Image (tube, helix red, strand yellow):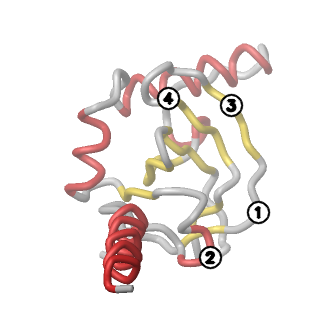
Amino acid sequence: MKTVSSRMLLLFGLALGLALNSCAAPSHQRHAMAICYVGTPEYEEKIARFRLTPAEAASRVADYIRARTPDTFAEPKLHVTGRHLLVINGAYHFFSPQKTGGIPLTGYYVDGMTGRVEFRKVDGSIPYPAK
């Protein structure tokens, strides 16, 4: 019986270790995504492993928007590409600022390794980082 409880304790410890991530995640979404805020050590660690820099990701978003709406003169600036304050899982996240009291999860996601851009409609938001 002692072996079973030791194994369960070990499994629990491993599960807890995997669940705890250096990146913040809303408690209701912790199982689904890892979120790192710009300017944190966790963010810097995460993007150091990416192939794309934040500037390259913003440029990809601008190209993506320009390709879908040729009339738009899309530059990688705030008013066109949105703001970048997060890395969600393995992607840079760009969003349009809204008066929601938080960062909307809907936005442009740029895979940090492949550079693939996609617009995702995601319900919910997360709090802005503490200043």
Amino acid under disc 2: His
Q: Find residue 76 and name its label.
A: 4
Please provide percent x and percent y for residue 57. 46, 28
Amino acid under disc 3: Glu
Q: CA distance from mark 4 to mark 2?
A: 32 Å
Q: Earlier in the sequence, mark 1 or mark 4?
A: 4
Q: Is residue 97 above or below residue 26?
A: above
Judge from the rendering whether residue 67 lies leftward or rightward of residue 7; answer left or right.
right
Amino acid under disc 4: Pro
Q: Is residue 125 above or below residue 90?
A: below
Please provide percent x and percent y for residue 86. 45, 52
Circle 2 residue: 28
Q: CA distance from mark 2 to mark 1?
A: 12 Å
Circle 1 residue: 123
Q: Is residue 8 above or below residue 85?
A: below
Please say whether residue 130 is visible from this viewpoint.
no
Circle 3 residue: 118
Location of residue 74 by image quarter: top right
